[in-house]
Image (spheres, rainbow, N blue to C red):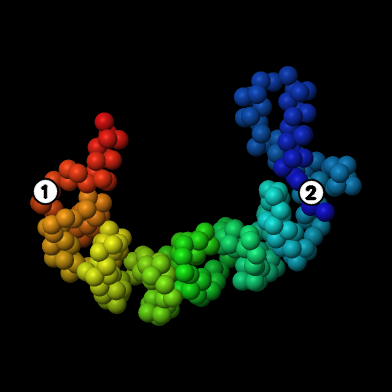
């Protein structure tokens, strides 16, 4: 049976407040230290073990299994459980990767996302090939796919070709945009530039995003196309700002003044400033 450690600590904290005679704000300042001390206190409800000792007695499989159980429940995952998983990273890492790859159900997306972040915090090798596959096959935005995108932005040169291959076979427009976003943060490649420029020229609905990618890629070849876009009739204020930022990021100077009176984004901004 899972133990609600957060509730247990809350009970201890209320008892401490009642017996200390201190003001609430004074106790609040002590909470981090009180929590650390509480983790090492023997507890009757743990048969005399402290919370830290309770988790230290478990092996890697028990720890990761319990992590999954907590994430499926409505309880907060205990801090000492996460700490112990991190301390035993060599043993828990492969089990975490397996859980992430095989987790299904209503909370599967949330659980996988937590594991992505936990692997990062543990400073263990990221399963970038798996992350690429997740993003390439994503049909729509999800917490998990977005977490994979953020991790892949730090994958570096070694995975650039794999991301390019995935882009060319992306299963949805969302997946393609995610992979292009990743490529824009990787070392420059002429193919990445061509992908971004093609989208910028022929996909007007998301022009601001593709302009941002061109800016991050850093090729001055994009300047004439960006500057021409700033002159187009009917350009939206939101797109104008993003394209202008990309031009300046590439070392260009924007001398084109436009009147955006009546544009809903521009009017909203003006109203906020007023």
- Taking the spot 79% from the left edge, 52% from the top edge, the residue there is 2
Left or right for 15, reference 82: right
Give the mark toward the camera: 1 or 2: 1
Q: Position of residue 140 (x, y in %)?
A: 46, 65
Confirm whether residue 193 shows in the render. Answer: no
Above or below, 165 relative to 114: below
The reply to whether discs 1 and 2 touch (Cβ–Cβ < 8 Å) is: no
Q: Which residue is mark 2?
A: 3
Q: Which residue is mark 1?
A: 257
- Taking the spot 37% from the left edge, 79% from the top edge, the residue there is 168
Please rate how many residues cluster around mark 2, counting C-alpha atoms within 10 Å: few if below 14, some from 14 to 19, many from 20: some
Above or below, 183 relative to 42: below
Residues 52 and 17: in front is 17
Q: From the image, which quarter does the C terminus lie in?
A: top left
Quadrant of res 43? top right
- Taking the spot 19% from the left edge, 58% from the top edge, the residue there is 247
């Amino acid at each position: 049976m899972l133990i609600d450690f957060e509730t247990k600590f809350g009970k201890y904290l209320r008892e401490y407040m009642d017996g200390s005679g201190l003001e609430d704000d004074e106790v609040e300042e002590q909470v981090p230290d009180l929590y650390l001390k509480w983790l090492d206190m023997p507890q009757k409800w743990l048969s005399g073990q402290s919370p830290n000792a309770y988790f230290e007695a478990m092996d890697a499989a028990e720890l990761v299994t319990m992590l999954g159980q907590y994430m499926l429940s409505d309880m907060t995952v205990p801090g000492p459980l996460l700490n112990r998983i991190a301390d035993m990273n060599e043993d828990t890492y492969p089990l975490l990767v397996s859980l992430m790859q095989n987790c299904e159900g209503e909370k599967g997306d949330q659980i996988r996302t937590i594991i992505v972040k936990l692997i990062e915090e543990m400073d263990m090798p990221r399963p970038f090939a798996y992350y690429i596959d997740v993003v390439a096959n994503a049909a729509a935005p999800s917490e998990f796919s977005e977490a994979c995108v953020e991790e892949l932005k730090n994958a570096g040169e070694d995975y650039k070709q794999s991301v390019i291959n995935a882009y060319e076979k992306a299963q949805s427009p969302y997946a393609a945009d995610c992979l292009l976003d990743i490529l824009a943060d990787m070392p420059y490649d002429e193919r990445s530039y061509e992908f971004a420029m093609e989208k910028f020229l022929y996909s007007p609905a998301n022009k601001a995003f593709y302009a941002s990618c061109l800016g991050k890629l850093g090729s001055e070849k994009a300047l004439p196309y960006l500057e021409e876009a700033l002159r187009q009739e009917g350009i939206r204020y939101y797109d104008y700002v993003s394209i202008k930022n990309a031009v300046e990021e590439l070392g260009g100077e924007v001398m084109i003044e436009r009147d955006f009176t009546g544009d809903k984004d521009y009017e909203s901004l003006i109203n906020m400033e007023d």
